[in-house]
Amino acid sequence: MATGFEIHDLVWAKMKGFPAWPGKIIEPKPEVKRPANNKKVHHFIFFFGSENYAWIPEENIYLYSDHRDKFKLEKRIPKGFKEALEAIEDELKEKPFIKTFKTKELPSIDEELAQIFPGKPSGSPQKDYTREPLKGKKKKRTDAGKDGNKSMETQNTVRRKRMSNSDDNPKPKKAKVIAKVTGSPSKITLSPDHKLKPKIRAELPSPRPEHNLPMSPPSHSYIQASLSPGNASASTQIEETLLKVKPVAKPSIIPTPMRIGFLGLGIMGQGMVMNLLRSGHEVTVWNRTALKCRDFVKSGAFKGNNPAEVVQSCDITFSCVADTTAVKDLVFGNYGVLQGISKGKCYVEMSTIDEETMQDVAEAITARGGVFLESPVVGSRVPALEGQLIILAAGERKLYDECYSCFEAIGKKSLYLGADIGAATRMKLIVNMVMGTVVAGLAEAMAMAEKVGLDQEDVAEVLSVGALSCPTVIHKSQAILSQRYDPHFPLQHQQKDLRLALLLGDKVEQPLYVASAANELYKKARRLGYGESDISAVYRAASN
C-alpha cells in the first residue's frame, strides 16, 4: 500500500484525546502489537520526550518540517513537551535534507472527541484505551489471586530477604489483624543520627520466570544524569530533611512479607515510601525522573526500570501521581502498569483523579486478572513525612486487608468505604473542596484586613485562639504573613481538585456556589504564576 512517509521521518503524531506530539517514524518493535484495523495505513512512532512508542494512523501524522510551528502549544503545555521539541529540533539539524509534502489538517482534540462520541458534551471524561487495546468485560472479582490471598503469621520480629527468580519458596501466612492505626500529629524533629535499615541495593532482581516482559531502553537524558549527579536541579532530588525526619511514634509495625512497589516520588510519594522503608517493608520504586530514586535506593529500596517491571516483580504496587493525564500515561502507556498485570497482581491507585478514570483503570486491571483498590489520601507534605495521612479506600476488601501494614506505616487512620469503585474518590474530592474554600476564605479575610487598616498578625492570632483554630488556618495564616509559599500542597493540585468536585456536582445537579467562586480565585492565582507554590499563595490572587 502506497504511503507518503518513510522510516526516520520526523513528524507530528496525534493520539486520540492527546495533543499532536513530536515524534519519529521507526522500525516496529515486535513486542508492540499491530492495530487490528488493516484497512488504514499505520506507522510506528517514537515520541520524543516521553520515550513511548505507538502505532498511529497515517491520517493523524503530519510531516514536522512542513508544519514546524503549527502544533506548538503556547498555554497548558504538558510535561515533556518542551523537551520533545528540543529533541526533534536537534535531530532535524542533523538531517542532510528536509522532506516536504502536503497532507490534510489534523483535527483538534475537541473535534476528534465529537466524532468519536457524538451527542456527548465535549467536557465529559472519556475512556482512553488507545495506548493498549483491551478485551473482556468488567468482572467483579471475589478471588484476590494466588499472591493476594496469602497471609502472614503474627510474629514479634519479621526479617526477610528478597527472593530470587524462583517461586519454590512459599510465603508465610498472616492472621488478619483488625486494629486502628494510632498516633497524633506532631512537629517534625530532626535527628542527624537517625538511620534506616542498612541494606543498600541498587538493582531490581529478575522477575518471576513465567513472565517475559521486554525492558525499555534507558533514555539518553537518564544516562547523562546518572553520570553527572552534581548537575541535577533541586526539583529532581529528594530533600535532605526527608532522610532525617522522624515519623510520629507508633506501636510496633509488623511489615507484610509481600513485595511492595511504589510508582511516583512527588511531594506525597517521597514521604510515604520513606515510612514504608522505615517500618521494614521491602519496596521497589520508580519515578519518571529517575534521579529521584537515587536516595531511596541508598536507604534500602530497589529501583525498577519502568512501571511494568515494577508491577511484574512485586505483589502489591501503589501509585501516587499528579493528575488524570499522568495516571492514564502510567497505566496505559508503553511499558505501563497494564503490561505488567497478570492474574493475582494487586494494584492500589492513590492519585486524586476523576471518578470515571478511576473506574476505567479498575476495569482494565481486573480484565487482566489483577486485583484493584482505589486509595486516595487526605493530608499534605508534613503528614506524609510523619506517617499521619488518612487513607480512604474502596474496592477489593481482601486487598485492603493485605495493605494493612502499609497503611499503618503511612497513615494514622484508614477507612474502607465499600466495594464501589469511585466512593473513595468522591470522598476525597469533597474533603479537598472544603479545604480549598476554607483557604480561599482565609486569603480574602487577610487581604481585606490589610485594606481596612488591621494588623494581619492580630487577625492570625485571633483565629488561632478562637473556634476557628485548626492546623490549616494556623499554618496557612503564617505562610501568608511570611510570604513564603513552599509547596506543602501545590496550588495547581488544589485547583484541579476543585474543578473535579464541580464536575461531580454537575453530574448530580448539586449547586456549588462557594466552591465555584473559590475555583475562580485559584485559577487567577495560577494565571499569576503561583501554580507550583503552596495553596496559601491564593492570597496573592485575593490581594492583587
Image (cartoon, helix red, strand yellow):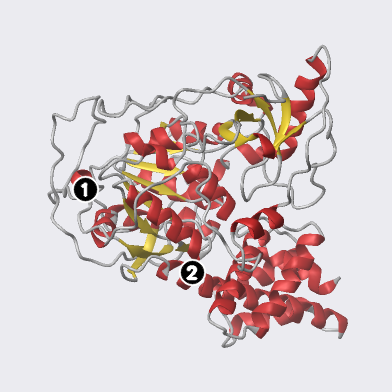
Q: Answer whether residue 257 is visible to the viewer in this image.
A: yes
Q: Residue at x 68, y 19 (%)?
A: 8
Q: Which-is-in-front pick, marks 1 and 2?
A: 1
Position of residue 112 measured from the top left corner of the image (x, y, whole percent): 67, 53
Task: Give the amino acid type for the residue marked by disc 2 in the picture.
Answer: Lys
Picture quadrant where residue 388 is located: bottom left
Does label 1 or label 2 sit earlier along the sequence? 1
- Callout 2 crowding tier (Cα within 10 Å): few <14, some 14–19, many ≥20: many
Q: Residue at x 68, y 35 (%)?
A: 233
The residue that label 1 is drawn on is 145
The residue that label 2 is drawn on is 428
Alpha carbon of mark 1 to alpha carbon of mark 2: how far?
28 Å
Task: Give the quadrant of the C terminus.
Answer: bottom right
Q: Which residue ends up furthest to the bottom in the rendered image?
A: 467
Q: Answer whether residue 323 is visible to the viewer in this image.
A: no
Position of residue 157 measured from the top left corner of the image (x, y, whole percent): 18, 44
